[in-house]
Image (tube, rainbow, N blue to C red):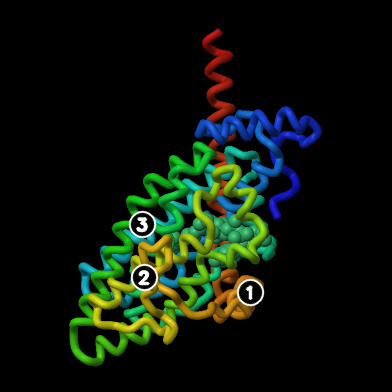
Amino acid sequence: MYSQGLIGADSSSDETPEFMAAFQQRIDREEKIEPNDPMPSGYRKTLIRQIGQHAHSEIVGMLPEGNWVTRAPTLRRKTALLAKVQDEGGHGLYLYSAAETLGVSRKQMTEELLDGRAKYSSIFNYPTPTWADIGAIGWLVDGAAIMNQIPLCRCSFGPYARAMVRVCKEESFHQRQGYEIMVTLAHGAPEQKEMAQDALNRWWWPSMMMFGPHDSDNTNSDQSMAWKIKRFTNDELRQKFVDATVPQAEYLGLSLPDPDLKWNPDKNDGKGSYDFGPIDWDEFWRVVKGGGMMNKDRIAARKKAWDDGEWVREAALAHAKKRKNQQATQNVAAE
Ligand code: BYC
């Protein structure tokens, strides 16, 4: 994915052992790598892949919640949800821009999303049939996203790290609005509490899968950790998420759908952590490969938006060309 047609990308022919060692030393000194700095082609490719996937996730992630904007139960809930969905659009745009600094165009990234070459987070292929799903997404999905993204604020690639600072501030608001919906439902009428529990039952395991495959099974982590793109492994982040979320579920009076969930005082170097049950990786890979409940709808919605927006892109380019020509004419007149 994103392997061809990089605009201005380095060739790997200069990647001598000395170059690679000097690059690693910069990383180890915690220097930020900026777009015009020399970098190994593998570093560039990894970032384009991850930032592209992240951008697509934000944009596709607007769809499950967008489904509820017109049906939010109160005006206050509607305005908060609208603001959240708009924030996600904004995050996608910062991230596409960060990826563009590495020499890939937004058009290319979008085409690769639409034809299935580029991934987006598995979580957004689940449906949102009830209002409680909006609470569960904010609480769990944004909660998992924050756990993953706070360390990305220290990513070695400058534009990604800087984009993440603002994204994380907004995600924190998103997580709170979701949790507040869950508090209202869980402490409301029995039917509301039941709705909240049902949403938790459906979103818990997909949220656990968001962190990606176990460390023993994933392909990119070791190199990404060495390059300080990732600061924690998938399993480390998943464990932090479980430890932070269990007390929040207890406050809600809801139960997590995992019979194996149990406090283990010896785990985590004796500091204690929760043990949890096995994750259904067959389901994860089925969803990642396009077999989830909503994969087809999500891609169809993005394709429609891309096709419907063609006239806007054409008009913007025509306007830019006209402005450039006018500027050139004015410059000639002024000489
Ligand atoms: N879904 O070696 P690994 C949000 C893939 S949106 C699909 O661990 P890596 C929000 C992975 O791509 C925020 N695919 O990979 C928006 C790789 O395949 P390729 C979303 C997944 O990259 C709206 C393969 O599995 N967050 O917050 O080192 C509303 C092996 O994995 C998934 C981000 O995008 C998955 N869940 O680590 C509400 C964070 N997991 O590419 C909220 C940025 C793994 O080799 N991304 N795969 O073919 C990351 O931190 C990392 O890319 C991951 C995976 C931890 C996700």
Q: Is residue 185 left or right of residue 324?
A: left
Q: Is the residue marked 2 within 8 Å of ligand 1, measured from its CB?
A: no
Labelled disc at residue 265: 2
- Quarter of the image where one finds residue 143: bottom left
Looking at the rendered structure, the secondary structure element under dot 3 is: helix
Q: Which residue sits at x=52%, y=31%? A: 29
Badge 2 crowding class, 10 Å Cα cut-off, few under 14, some 14 to 19, many 20 or more, is: few
Q: Which residue sits at x=28%, y=70%? A: 179
Q: Is residue 114 left or right of residue 138?
A: right
> In the picture, which quadrant includes the C terminus?
top right
Ligand 1 quadrant? bottom right
Question: For the residues marked 2 and 3, what is the alpha-carbon distance in whole angstroms?
Answer: 31 Å
The amino acid marked with disc number 2 is: Pro
Looking at the rendered structure, the secondary structure element under dot 1 is: helix
The amino acid marked with disc number 3 is: Glu
Residue at image mark 1? 285
Q: Is residue 90 left or right of residue 10?
A: left
> In the picture, which quadrant includes the N terminus?
bottom right
The amino acid marked with disc number 1 is: Trp
Q: Earlier in the sequence, mark 2 or mark 3?
A: 3
- 304 lies above or below 203: above
Q: Which residue sits at x=60%, y=76%? A: 281
Residue at image mark 3? 171
Q: Depth-wise, is mark 2 or mark 3 nearer the camera? A: 2
> Contact (CB < 8 A) between labels 1 and 2?
no
Where does the image place residue 101, in percent across and percent down from the top left?
58, 38
View extreme (top): residue: 335
Q: Earlier in the sequence, mark 1 or mark 3?
A: 3
Q: Earlier in the sequence, mark 1 or mark 2?
A: 2
Q: Is the residue marked 3 within 8 Å of ligand 1, measured from its CB?
A: yes
Question: For the residues marked 1 and 2, what is the alpha-carbon distance in whole angstroms?
Answer: 32 Å
- 226 lies above or below 1: above
